[in-house]
Amino acid sequence: MTVPNRGRRAVALLYGLVALTVHGVQGQTPVASEQKPVAPSTAAEKTGEAHPQKLAIGVRARILPVRAFSVMDNGQVMNTATVSKVNYDSNYNTVSHSLMVGGGLTLEARISRRMLVTAEVLFNRLRYDKTTDVFSGTDDPTTAADERSHKITTEKTKARLFDLPVLVHRNLRSSGWLSHFYVAGGATARLVTTVRTTNNITNPDLTKANNQIRAGVDKRTLVGATVGAGFRFVDEFNIKVTPEVRYTRWNGMTFNQDSTRSPRNQLEVGIAFSR
């Protein structure tokens, strides 16, 4: 069958339009294949530059490993005095029973990428026993017995100590393993409260007495300079673990009488958990 010339032209024109349409579609870039911008959170995760948390609150525990650098030390003092030609020999002996462990709350605020400030309220129980032996009169050296009068006073004292350190921490490096290590410095205030004392007395004639006259406090409030060093680790749950060693030099003594003398130097080892 012979196709007319006009029909052949129409078919050729239709074929050309279909070819042009197919070529245009193949030359276009699909919209779905265009690269989408990375979300800010994803970009931060890839670069590791997520914004650090500004505030964190937690708990801190500490131990005072050396009694001579703790809240109370053992002590012994002997004293001799003469009153109205009567000799008095006094022996004072203090034994500390204070807990070496304490703790409290901690709050930290970041002030720069490598620096933060911490404020804490730490609590320790103080307890000691003091025995005072007072010998009066004259002993006859030719006899084996002691003819002097002997008075014994046993003091049992308890108190509560609150330390409020405010320290600035600075990381040694901004990256690498040493970025976990920091040094710290600042001031600590100490307050003693709830002082309770029981005195049991044995008189020379062996009669007994007791009272609740509180032990004298030399300074109810102290201020000390504190320095420290430690490590700071943060896990994937943003929990911060901070082991640390601190040294504090106090400007005075909480108790300062006879053999009962609070140390002016304090050494502590602690660890904090915050989030």
Image (tube, helix red, strand yellow):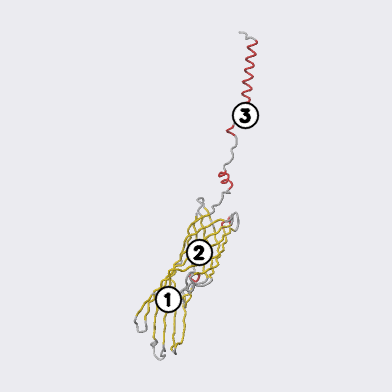
Q: Residue at x 59, y 32 (%)?
A: 31
Q: Amino acid at mark 1?
A: Lys
Judge by depth and name the residue closer to the eye, 52 or 73.
52
Q: Earlier in the sequence, mark 3 or mark 1?
A: 3
Dot label at residue 130: 1
Task: Give the secondary structure at mark 3.
Answer: loop
- Residue 200 occupies which quadrant of the picture? bottom left
Query: Distance between the Cα atoms at labels 2 and 1?
Result: 28 Å
Residue, far left: 207
Against 120, residue 14 (above or below) is: above
Question: Which is in the foreground here, disc 2 or disc 1?
Answer: 2
Q: Earlier in the sequence, mark 3 or mark 2?
A: 3
Question: For mark 2, what is the residue?
Answer: 164
Estimate the x, y position of residue 33 in percent, counting from the top left: 59, 34
Q: Amino acid at mark 3?
A: Gln
Estimate the x, y position of residue 121 in percent, counting from the top left: 48, 62
Q: Amino acid at mark 2?
A: Leu
Task: Give the secondary structure at mark 1.
Answer: strand
Which corner quadrant holds the N terminus? top right
Mark 1 is surrounded, within 10 Å at the Cα level, by few (under 14), some (14 to 19) or many (20 or more) other residues, namely: many
Judge by depth and name the residue closer to the eye, 9 or 191.
191
Question: Which is in the foreground here, disc 3 or disc 2?
Answer: 2
Task: Give the left or right position of residue 216, taking residue 111 as reference.
Answer: left
Please tell me how many numbered marks the rendered image carries.
Answer: 3
Estimate the x, y position of residue 222 in percent, counting from the top left: 51, 69
Question: For mark 3, what is the residue?
Answer: 28
Q: Earlier in the sequence, mark 2 or mark 1?
A: 1
